[in-house]
């Protein structure tokens, strides 16, 4: 009988072997795992000198601050490392069908300024994005920060997005936005990277990070003009293969034949979305143009609006019951324009979910309204931008462009006439020397004696070899010799222009042999 496979979760954090870059060191400080240099050395196994090199590079480039906790006479207090946030800002943009919200945060997650304006997404990408750019400039001026302090921008849009390219693909609610280059628009105006994703994914990310940090499996359902779902799986945002995961608004509901703007009929969005409810209320003689108007009518006590919202909740619950049986989430969060009428909508959702889902899946299930409310999309977009700025690969790239964290030593340049071995030794820093090669081979030497033939390149000469070597003047000119004098303890060597094989038993450090082809590459 074969052993059962292990069900232990695979650790997502970097291993000790991978914690060698400044970006990984910064991640330890950002997550609160390490507070001092000693903590970093203990967690990573790196030498103290290496830790100091990484930390000093991060401090020099403005990512970290280091200051003492307090002062005690006669005692040396540890210096605490903290993330430097003032000089690094991110922007989060939440675009809806009828509104635009822009938030400005530092990379520590503190919200500095927010502005929301009514704006129709159907006006087209140029008009909408120009409004966003003007708003962002105004927010930067309001907090007295230059545009150069902006590091990244996150944008949430109400349509399907190919996350890799940041382009929308046939968005039903956004005419004229198909394949529009949103990242290029902001790169031309602010010179930073822009990450574009579906707005409900941004909402799910913001809600999970700020309100449910201990929940690893969460569904965020937006019930507004349209209906969508953001999926958090094992603490991470799940987008699927192309970025269309969670598009539940176009799942067919029952036998309803109401036409949907996607081209199909009977979609959940066409039956229970805010725009669909507003059209039905308008047909019944009640003035309503959007999901927000429907919520206003519910709060004012309109019986027809209350009945429609309750029925819409049941339709959403029918679809969610299948997702619960399949995905088994810990929490379901309802947001969007209709989530403001929480009692009626959530009552309908719970009714269908507990009726059609498996008891084990709903035993500890939480069904709650969004607590981030209207700020969920902009907040999640800013957090996504922060993740990009603080990603280890991104931090390492920034430091490498400015001043590499592991530079080659500033040795004298190797001339074209220098021996090949000397050029290799000059160009290779000690921190990146190759691992030991194969064991020495036994080979006959000159004179019949058996000597060890080492296939590895040697950069040093042992004291035994030096004692065994006969005294002879070094024929390499003083200008090219690595020694302080023109005499050394090595056999005579011909000038570098006429290289001569030197026995491996007595290498000549002024002119070491070139590396063997079998050696590891530098």
Image: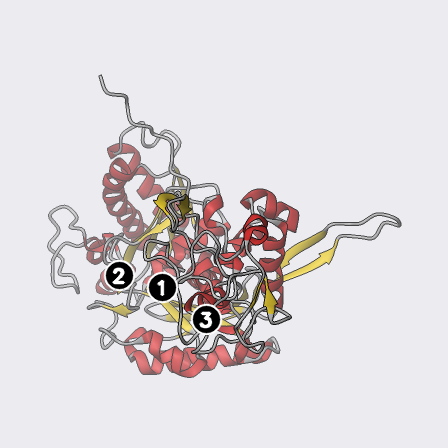
Q: Which residue is at a point 27% across and 21% down the rendered structure image?
A: 3
Q: Are marks 3 and 1 in contact (CB under 8 Å)?
A: no
Query: Farthest residue in the top direction?
Result: 1
Closer to us: mark 2 or mark 1?
Answer: 1
Dot 2 or dot 1: first in sequence order is 2
Q: Quadrant of residue 267?
A: bottom left
Residue behind mark 3: 494
- 10 Å neighbourhood of mark 2: few (<14), some, or many (≥20)? some
**Residue closer to the observer: 88 or 129:** 88
Rendered location of residue 520, percent (x, y): 37, 54
Q: Earlier in the sequence, mark 3 or mark 2?
A: 2
| Label 3 element class | loop
Is residue 389 in view from this perspective? no
Spatial distance from mark 3 to mark 1, Cα to Cα?
93 Å
Quick one: label 3, few (<14), some, or many (20+) residues within 10 Å? some
Whether residue 431 sits left or right of residue 453 in the image: it is right
Residue at 38%, 35% in the rendered image:
9
Instruction: Name the residue tied to disc 1.
Output: 293
In the picture, the quarter occupied by the C terminus is: bottom left
**Residue 75's spot in the image, x, y percent?**
84, 47
How far across and how far down the image is residue 494, in percent?
45, 71
Disc 3 versus disc 2: distance between alpha carbons? Answer: 99 Å
Tell me the CA gap for discs 2 and 1.
10 Å
Circles 2 and 1, Cβ within 8 Å, touching? The answer is yes
Where is mark 2, residue-wise? 281
């Amino acid at each position: 009988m074969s052993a059962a496979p292990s069900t232990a979760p695979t650790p997502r954090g970097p291993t000790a072997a991978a914690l060698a870059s400044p970006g990984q060191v910064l991640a330890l400080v950002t997550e609160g795992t390490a507070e001092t240099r000693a903590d970093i050395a203990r967690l990573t196994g790196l030498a103290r000198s290496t830790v100091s090199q990484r930390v000093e590079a991060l401090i020099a480039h403005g990512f970290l601050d280091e200051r003492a906790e307090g002062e005690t006479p006669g005692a040396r207090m540890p210096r605490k490392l903290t993330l430097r946030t003032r000089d690094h800002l991110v922007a989060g943009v939440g675009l809806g069908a009828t509104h635009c919200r822009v938030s400005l945060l530092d990379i520590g997650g503190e919200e500095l300024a927010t502005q929301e304006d009514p704006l129709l997404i159907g006006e087209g990408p140029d008009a909408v994005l120009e409004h966003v750019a003007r708003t962002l400039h105004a927010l930067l001026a309001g907090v007295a920060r230059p545009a150069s302090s902006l590091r990244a921008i996150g944008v949430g849009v109400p349509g399907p997005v190919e996350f890799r390219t940041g382009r929308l693909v046939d968005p039903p609610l956004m005419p004229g936005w198909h394949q529009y280059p949103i990242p290029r628009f902001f790169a031309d105006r602010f010179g930073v990277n822009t990450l574009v994703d579906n707005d409900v994914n941004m909402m799910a990310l913001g809600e999970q990070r700020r309100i449910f940090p201990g929940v690893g499996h969460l569904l965020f359902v937006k019930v507004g003009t349209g209906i969508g779902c953001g999926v958090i799986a094992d603490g991470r945002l799940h987008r699927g293969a192309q970025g269309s995961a969670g598009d539940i608004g176009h799942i067919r509901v029952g036998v309803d034949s109401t036409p949907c703007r996607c081209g199909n009929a009977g979609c959940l969005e066409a039956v229970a979305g805010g725009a669909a409810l507003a059209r039905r209320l308008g047909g019944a003689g009640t003035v309503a143009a959007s999901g927000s108007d429907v919520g206003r009518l519910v709060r004012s006590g309109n019986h027809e609006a209350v009945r429609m919202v309750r029925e819409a909740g049941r339709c959403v619950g029918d679809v969610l019951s299948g997702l619960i049986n399949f995905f088994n989430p810990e929490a379901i969060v309802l947001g969007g324009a209709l989530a403001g009428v929480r009692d009626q909508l959530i009552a309908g959702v719970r009714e269908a979910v507990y009726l059609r889902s498996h008891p084990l899946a709903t035993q500890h299930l939480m069904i709650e309204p969004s607590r981030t409310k209207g700020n969920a999309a902009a907040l999640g977009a800013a957090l996504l931008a922060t993740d990009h700025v603080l990603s280890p690969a991104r931090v390492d790239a920034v430091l490498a462009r400015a001043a590499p964290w592991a530079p080659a030593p500033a040795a004298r340049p190797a001339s074209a006439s220098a021996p090949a071995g000397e050029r290799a030794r000059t160009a290779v820093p000690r921190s990146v020397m190759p691992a030991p090669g194969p064991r020495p081979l036994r080979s006959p030497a000159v004179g019949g004696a058996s000597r060890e033939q080492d296939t590895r390149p040697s950069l040093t000469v042992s004291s035994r070899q030096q004692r065994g070597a006969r005294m002879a003047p070094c024929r390499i000119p003083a200008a090219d010799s690595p020694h302080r004098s023109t005499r050394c303890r090595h056999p005579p060597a011909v000038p570098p222009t006429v290289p001569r094989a030197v026995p491996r038993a007595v290498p000549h450090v002024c002119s070491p042999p070139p590396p063997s082809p079998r050696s590891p590459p530098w």
